[in-house]
Amino acid sequence: MAELILTFEWDGKTIKKETKGFVGKTCMSKTKFIEDALGTSEDRKFKSEYYEEDTNKEQETDRLKN
Amino acid sequence: MSHFVNITTMIKDRHALIRALERMGFKGKIEIHEKPENLYGYQNDVRTEKAQVIIRRKHVGSSSNDIGFEQKANGLFVAHISEFDQGTGSYASRTGRYGKEWQMKLYTWYGVEKAKCEFEKQGMKYYEDVDDQERPRLRVKI
């Protein structure tokens, strides 16, 4: 199961959002709601997993083709 | 793992603001109004500022003024805190209990409470703790 971790800085402004266990771009779509609710997002850094293919999605597409 | 992002907090949600103020010790001491109400000074004088979320001066401290949070047309809440209570301007020589440090803490707790409100709305279970630097942290399985 994937995990979302929010760490709140005591400067009162900055919240660090980290996602774990997501493959591909699903981390963005499944956790965007929290960014929208909290404020404005900046300084986004993608981890290597973001650029990996979502194999589940590919398999699903293949099944639909067949 | 897939990405990190920094989010800048903006206070827009009244319910989360109230939860944050309660965490800062004002549980049962917060007035909530649909329309902005007058704020009063330490001599019971009506101030020019109005607010929808108010902590009356008797709960703020000795010789203090009301503290208010006014929601502007853009939805953002603006804090009305006197110079005396902040320890700024002509009162810069005294340590105001409700200065920058207090306000930063409030924004931090607002972020925590706003995130919790959103998780509750989505039916998500969260776990709250602090990290190794004593910063509040929320974890959610998705």
Image: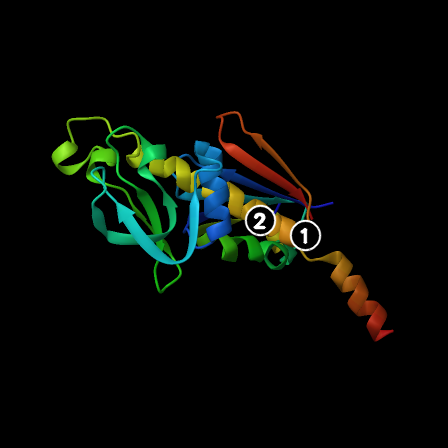
Instruction: Work out whether residue A20 or residue B30 is closer to the camera in this orientation and state it.
Output: B30
**Quarter of image, res B34:** bottom left
On what subunit does the disc labeled 1 rest? Answer: A
What type is the residue that disc 2 sits on? Cys
Residue named by callout 2: B117
Residue B54 locus on image (x, y percent): 37, 46
Residue found farthest to the left: B90
Nearest the camera: B26 or B113?
B26
Which secondary structure lies at badge 2?
A: helix
Q: Is residue A56 left or right of residue B78?
A: right
Q: Which residue is mark 1?
A: A23
Of marks 1 and 2, the one in the foreground: 2
Using residue B111 as the reference point, say whether residue B46 is left or right of it.
left
As drawn, which residue projects farthest toward the bottom? Answer: A65
The amino acid type of the residue labelled 1 equals Val
Q: Is residue A47 left or right of residue B37?
A: right
Determine if residue B114 is in view.
yes
